[in-house]
Amino acid sequence: MNRPTVALIAHDGKKDALVEFVQANQPWFEKFDLIGTGTTGGRIASLGIQIECLASGPLGGDAQIASRITENRVQAVIFFRDPMGKHPHEPDINMLLRQCDVHNVPLATNYATASLLIGRSALVSE
């Protein structure tokens, strides 16, 4: 039985935040197959969470996830981006974001939108 797949990605300055988010919401994430870019996936795997690790973002991981989106193999993306940093693989990042829009795949790029995606409101304290 195939479960929906969620892709997890984070820029270097946001990796800690994504790992903490996944850990705090582990029961939700356990309902899905997870894929992630290299270092991010490895950090999440260190929590004992099963995740398929692809290449790191700068080495093609973003492009790998975009490819899976076009094949209808990814149903949601959580990408904690660092909008203030420079990223040498910016074209791949833009392609990934564009594929989410083209294929109508939910994309959360920060804690607040990720909270809404998983059904938790970041607007009120719980």
Image (tube, rainbow, N blue to C red):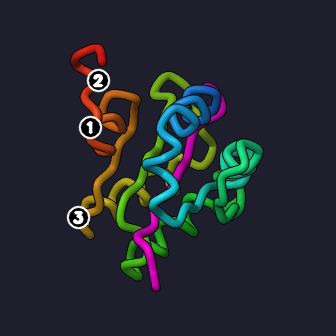
Q: Is 10 in front, or is 46?
A: 46
Residue indicated by mark 3: 104
Residue indicated by mark 1: 116
Q: Secondary structure at mark 3?
A: loop
Question: Which tag is nearer the camera, tag 1 or tag 3?
Answer: 1
Three-letter code for the amino acid on which mark 1 is drawn: Leu
20 lies above or below 63: above
68 lies above or below 91: below
Residue indicated by mark 2: 122
Three-letter code for the amino acid on which mark 2 is drawn: Ala
Q: Disc 3 and disc 2: Cα gap in Å?
A: 23 Å
Residue 118 counted in the magenta span: no
Among numbered discs 1 and 3, the one appearing first in the sequence = 3
Which residue extends farthest bottom?
A: 1
Question: Which tag is nearer the camera, tag 3 or tag 2?
Answer: 2
Which range is magenta? 1-13
Three-letter code for the amino acid on which mark 3 is drawn: Asn
With 103 as the anchor, is 5 left or right in this view? right
Q: Residue at x 66, y 65 (%)?
A: 52
Q: Secondary structure at mark 2?
A: loop
Q: Secondary structure at mark 1?
A: helix
Among numbered discs 2 and 1, the one appearing first in the sequence = 1
